Amino acid sequence: MNKFSIALATLALGSTAAFADCTKPDAPNLPNGASATMEDMLAGQKAVKAFQSANVEYMKCLEEVFTSAEAKVKEGGLAEDVLAETQKTYNDAVEAYNAAVSSEESVAGQFNTEIREYKAANPG
């Protein structure tokens, strides 16, 4: 393997390493709205906001990974194995990004359900 191929392989593996540096946040535990206190609901709201903030950072990291991989592919000149690894990195990062969007929507939807249950259990 010549120096050029080694450099290209390092670039592709760098993309994979960058993907590993993106930290996926855990979804928060949400209060049961039907039995929660106001303090529980406020703590749940705070946890949701913290999750959303961490998720935005995670998605920014993933976007950097797939944007970088896309640019490397567009530049061309990659060895076939490096090209395949770079494309895999791109696909994995996009898939993780889409999953993060879905996770955030799910958490927000679930919390809204708990709010409605809290309001039903605590009218007035």
Image (spheres, helix red, strand yellow):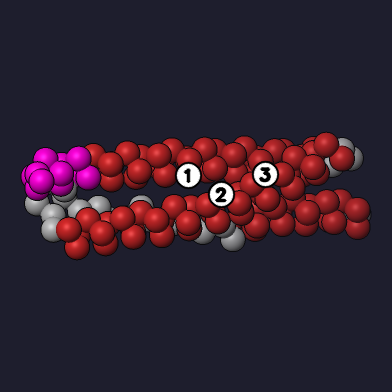
Residue 81 shows in this picture: no
Which amino acid does the dot numbered 1 rest on?
Answer: Ala
Can you say whether 45 is above or below 80 in the image?
below
Q: Residues within 10 Å of mark 3 (few under 14, many from 20)?
A: many
Q: Is residue 29 magenta?
A: no
Q: Position of residue 80 (x, y in %)?
A: 80, 37
Q: Quadrant of the rendered structure where residue 39 is?
A: bottom left
Check disc 1 and report the residue beneath it.
100
Can you say whether 29 is above or below 110 in the image?
below
Residue 57 shows in this picture: yes
SS class, disc 2? helix
- Along the line of sight, the residue nearer the viewer: 63 or 44: 44
Nearest to N terminus: mark 1 or mark 3 = 3
Check disc 3 and report the residue beneath it.
66
Calculate the distance from the C-alpha at mark 2 to the C-alpha at mark 3: 10 Å
In the image, what residue occupies the spot 25% across and 53% down? 30
Nearest to N terminus: mark 2 or mark 3 = 2
Calculate the distance from the C-alpha at mark 1 to the C-alpha at mark 3: 14 Å
- Along the line of sight, the residue nearer the viewer: 86 or 101: 101
In the image, what residue occupies the spot 65% across and 53% down? 16
Q: Position of residue 84 (x, y in %)?
A: 72, 38
Which amino acid does the dot numbered 2 rest on?
Answer: Met
Please state the extent of the stretch shown in magenta in the rendering: 114-124
In the image, what residue occupies the spot 54% across and 42% down? 97
SS class, disc 1? helix
Calculate the distance from the C-alpha at mark 1 to the C-alpha at mark 2: 7 Å
Q: Quadrant of the rendered structure where residue 113 is?
A: top left
Check disc 2 and report the residue beneath it.
59
In this view, the mark in front (2 or 3):
2
SS class, disc 3? helix
